[in-house]
Amino acid sequence: MAAQPYDEAPSRRSEQPYDENPPRRSEQRQARAEHHQGPGDPYQRGGQQPPRSRARQDTRAMNHQETIVSDGPRRSRRRGSGGPSEPPGPPGPPAPPRGKDGGGRGGWRRFVPSWKIVVAGAVVLAAGLFGMVMVAYANTPVPNGAQADALAQQSTIYFRDGKHVIAKLGYKREIVPIERMAESVKDGAVAIENDTFYEDSGISISGMFRSLWNTATGQQLQGASTITQQMARGYYDGLSQEVSIKRKVMEIFVAVKLDDTMSKDEILATYLNTVNFGRAYGVEAAAKAYFGNRVTAAKLTPEQGAYLAARIQQPAWAPDAPELKWRFNTVIKYMAEQWPEKYGNLPKTAKFPKTVKNSGDGGLGGLNGYMVRQVLQELEGRGLTTDMVKSGGYDIISTFDRRLMKAAQTAVKSTRKAFNMSTEFHGGLAAVDPKNGRVLAFYGGDDYLTDPWNEPFQSTKQAASAFKPYVLAAWLQAGYSLKSYVPGNQTVPKELPGQQKGGITNSHNVGAAVDVVKATAQSVNTAFVSMAFALPNKLDDVKNLVEAAGFNTQRMEDDVKVHHYQFAIGSALVTPVEQAAGYAIFANGGKYTRYHVVRQVKLNGKVAYPEQAPTKTVIDPGVAADSTIAMQEVLKSGTAVGKGLGARPAAGKTGTNNDEKEAWFVGYTPQISTAVGFYREQCLTKTGKVVPPEHSNCPIFRKGSKKFGPNNPYTRPKEVSLGFEGAGPPTIAWQKFMQLAHEGLPIEQFPDRAEVGVPENIVPSPTPTPTPTPESDDPFDTDNPFDQGDEDCFVNCGDDAGTDDDASIDDGLDEDTGGPASGDLDFSGGGAAPDARPTGAGPTYLRPEDQ
């Protein structure tokens, strides 16, 4: 540590003036040396004196320094000096001033290293970094295998037989040599993506540092990527698409090595045969996809080549998107700047090229598009994206039956025609195999390309009385029996929490008490609301059961909060496919399998994605059997009498909303569960004018007017009365489909009546000795033949009572899809079956995981 003069004891400080700029160490040494020489020193006067050795000078300086700061003379530390140390001489001249004007380094400058140190440090650092880079570069291999995207192939979606094709998605890659690529597409890609391609070594230094900095600082991903880097990342396996510095550094090293081992033409050819252009992968397939099958990569015009080059950055752009047009003009400009001899006049003459309609839709017209959409939506939820499907070469086997899809369309369309329904009427049908949850068929529209809305999967409507069987199941599951007597003319209690003015009533007189079978067949509102109230956990038992049966949890909870006990008679919003899968618990011994549309996905002949069909027990098998007994009476003698399947056993339930805005029939056999729903929408302008729908959709635009659009639609849908009930067209369409669907199938019987539970009379029986309803006899009063079909209604349903529109909360087309892509529908169900009461038989669990 360098000693500082004048910083010993305070008494010494008083002897010497304080110097704010103490001399540097070298100046101290010079002053001390002059002091030892004295005034007569010939060296000081300019005379010559043999120089002392450096060690001797340093030693002298140190000795003198110690003499100055000590309190007394000290012996010399030199060994072998031959005598005593020299006596201290008089003080030397004052140290020269330090600072800006006086020379030396004062203040903060004393901490700044000299330029020699800085240069030396930089050289060492650079050498170390260079060595590290060279080692990393030497140890980075060039991948030798192409990744999947570089060899993208079409995927094929099949019907459930695995033979008949529904659609092919994606494009077959057509590899062409660079000689068969037009100059314009090559030059356009270079101009817009990497203008130094022919001069650089595979990387852009400025772009590389920009990209590394943005990634390291967490800013947006910015590519430095040259064409060589893009080719390496898009073609070779081992270069992942993750955003990380490690991946970018590896990509850079690979690009440099590729530039050393491949010619520029080879790199560019691989790139243009690999890159995604939106409708196609590779320039050859893209040329045909956008400009027709007769246009190959070799025949592209300068405008067409620039168009494809402009698509590289954002392949998902629409064919005539404004952003694409702007980038097209940029490509033209860059081409002219880089090759003026070839494209100098192109900016003045170039016009945005016209493209053909998307001929690569895989045959999505007609019914096919609806099936493809549901398959892709389900696979998306399993991590297999649409892009992966289009380029992965998968063989996807759906659950759809080719014959039954046509049967569903025939059943609904023929029914609509028979009742002279206009395009304002919407019908949806869904059929599910109750044993495994496979969606066998559905009808949601006639042409996906003009009307992509899929009714049975996307339209959520109030279930109305078709929801009552779930209350029946909860009643039996709680330990009560079909022999119980329940209220007929009014609810018990008369006033229920949350009920509307006038309470919940029926549109016809059924007497003070009915048994549960008659209540089901006759669709008695007061009975089912009272049954829900009498359950151990009241509405929670019903809500938990339907959630376990696959219904959307959020929709069920929201409806209970809004409509309270109207929930028990169908105020909740459901889709036809949910209803078809939900009724499967009755057809399949109480077990629910979530509905799905994909059986398996194969890749290179091996199963890559197996079928997902988790099954859970929702109700006891005996509960399912007795529920079926009650619902068979609906077709035998109830609201849908005479519309069964002849000798083939069938069961189901009608449903009609207030004002007949929605009408349903949901029914099943042991082999198929099917739901049919209808609703009607009129298209109204702001002035109330009714406008005919376009392809069953309300028009958003008005011809000849620029005023209207998505944010200001020309018309809006309003749901209006159908003019018929669930026992009408919905039941007829169901009957037609089920007859067609069961052709060639053996007749299967339902389980025998299980007689679960014990009678739990909410009201006294109509006779001293309760007599159960005979299964073979007409259970209805002779003065109530039900000539009017389904008598479902929510509130104020008497002859002299008006209908309260507030009971129907769905006056427009609900946009809640309930599908997995929207995150709305939990296919597996989230509820649990209610526990049995001690007085009745408890549920029998067939699987350990259901206990």
Image: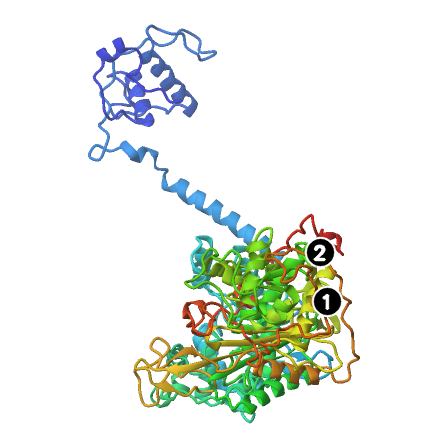
Res. 346 image quadrant? bottom left
Res. 396 image quadrant? bottom right
In the figure, is residue 703 to the left or right of 606?
left
Residue 516, position in %: x, y? 64, 64
Which residue is label 2 attached to?
A: 757
Rendered-image quadrant of the N terminus: top left
Q: Tell me the tag on residue 588.
A: 1
The answer to whether residue 612 of the structure is visible from this angle is no
> Which one is in front in this view, the residue at disc 1 or the one at disc 2?
2
Q: Secondary structure at mark 2?
A: loop
Query: Which residue occupies the foreground of this view, 291 or 345?
Result: 291
For marks 1 and 2, the one nearer the N-term is 1
Q: Work out whether 14 lies above or below 401.
A: above
The answer to whether residue 157 of the structure is visible from this angle is yes
Disc 2 marks a residue whose amino acid type is: Gly
Q: Mark 1 and mark 2: span between their CA atoms?
A: 20 Å
In percent of the image, x 74 and y 85: which residue is there? 743
